[in-house]
Image: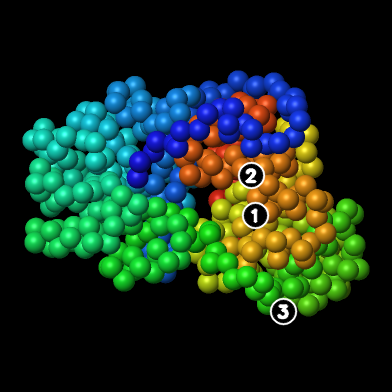
Amino acid sequence: MKMEAHPVGAQEAAGELTAPGRFPVIQEVPNPLANRYLARQPILDAHGKVHGYELLFRAGREASFRGDGVRATQNILDQTVVFGLDVLTNGHTAFVNCTREAILEEQVRVLPPDRTVLELLETLEPDAQLLTACQRLHRSGYRFALDDFTWSNSWQPFLPLVDYIKVDIEQMDVIARMELQGTLRIHHCSAAWIAERVETEEDFQQLRREGFGLFQGYFFSRPAIVENRAIPTNRMLHLELLRSLLEDPLDQNKLSDLVKRDPSLMLRLFRLVNSPLYGMRNEIHSIRMALQLVGDAVFRRMATLAVASEMLGDQPSELLQMAFHRARFCEIVATQRGLDAAEQYMLGMLSLVPALLHTSADIVVNHLPLRQPIRLALMGAKNPERGSLCWIECYEHGEWARCDALAEQLGISSEQMAALYLESLQWARENMPLEVQE
């Protein structure tokens, strides 16, 4: 997958936040990783299970990835060492774009071969020197993918080394894709096919019919909207619970009644109370007693996650972790922006509820007593309340120029925002319940 961001001017992107004036500038905290930028995109199988993650890198403040220098390449590989693949990929395979220098000088050996796929960019010259280096790495256990692949006879000697073929569906139509598959069959290439830029359910179903087995894009977080689709009755309880969680302080009587009506939430609550964290030695005689024991803040977080998990249904768990990640990111950025952290946490989590329920955002918003700016933010308005959410959405897609412009508008450096992205990613990974982790 290409890592160039769409060209967006700083003033244009910054103008997306329409509030008058600027937010107060936050004093930057020195960070040894200040020049590190990293995002990731999931690669899913036909059942929505995570197969791996492509790691998207940027070496510095430039608006796009630069893969034409040793220094940039070393920075790229170093990030996987500094942050650790466990944090970045949840134990799944890492797909890493490689420059010519990374292959020829074997800089990629800092990555574990059993968990790494080296992507050969379409811009590389497939000459004898590159082939020899790839063969040497292949013997060490590294796998290879041909990125944004189009057929050229010069790539034929590389086919025995290749485990994945990545096709950009925006650059290659159905006929061209079928012709490419036919050509590779002639050359006895048995590599798995990955479709890139899969943005809709229609794309997904068409590519499955064509024989693609792996998919990269955001089709799973872009629901097929049905106009005026009603929210199922069993989901109304969840939305009612979310509404109650917005109250401060929490209404213990109302929550007790709601928990009684949700067996899965009741189970989670009592498991939490029974955990070593609380060290209970006496029996719990009521739901209200359990609520009082865990406290408002802990129950809010646990219940929000429980509701999202219940809404997940047959959706890929990556979607839930994305919601959890967004929620935590918006929460910790809120403390620097002077916004309500709890409200921003809810905004991040609710941003993917329409995808979880396969309905439109306005239907969800109508069931929650949110402040008008938050309602508008969930509907997509580019207002100040949506600033952090907008930034992480752009970052998920590797749209670095827009991220920089938005960070400037928010009054927080791009380096700080990138560090908070990674901090919240690790937090989300560590706090995901075991039953929904891959």
At label 1, counting other C-alpha atoms closer than 10 Å, the crowd grade (few under 14, some 14-19, many 20 or more) is many
**Proximity of marks 3 and 1: CB atoms separated by less than 8 Å:** no
> Is there any visible trace of residue 283 in the rendered image?
no
The tag earlier along the polypeptide, 2 or 3, is: 3
At 65% across and 40% down in the image, what residue appears?
A: 388
Tally of marks: 3
Residue at figure coordinates x 83%, y 65% from the top left: 290
Work out whether residue 388 can be spotted: yes
Q: Is residue 346 left or right of residue 178?
A: right
Q: Which residue is mark 2?
A: 389
Residue underneath mark 3: 233
Toward the viewer: 76 or 390?
Answer: 390
Q: Are marks 1 and 2 in contact (CB under 8 Å)?
A: yes
Circle on res. 351: 1
Which of disc 1 and disc 3 is earlier in sequence? 3
Q: Tell me the kind of residue under disc 2.
A: Leu
Amino acid type at circle 1 is: Ser
Secondary structure, mark 3, is: helix
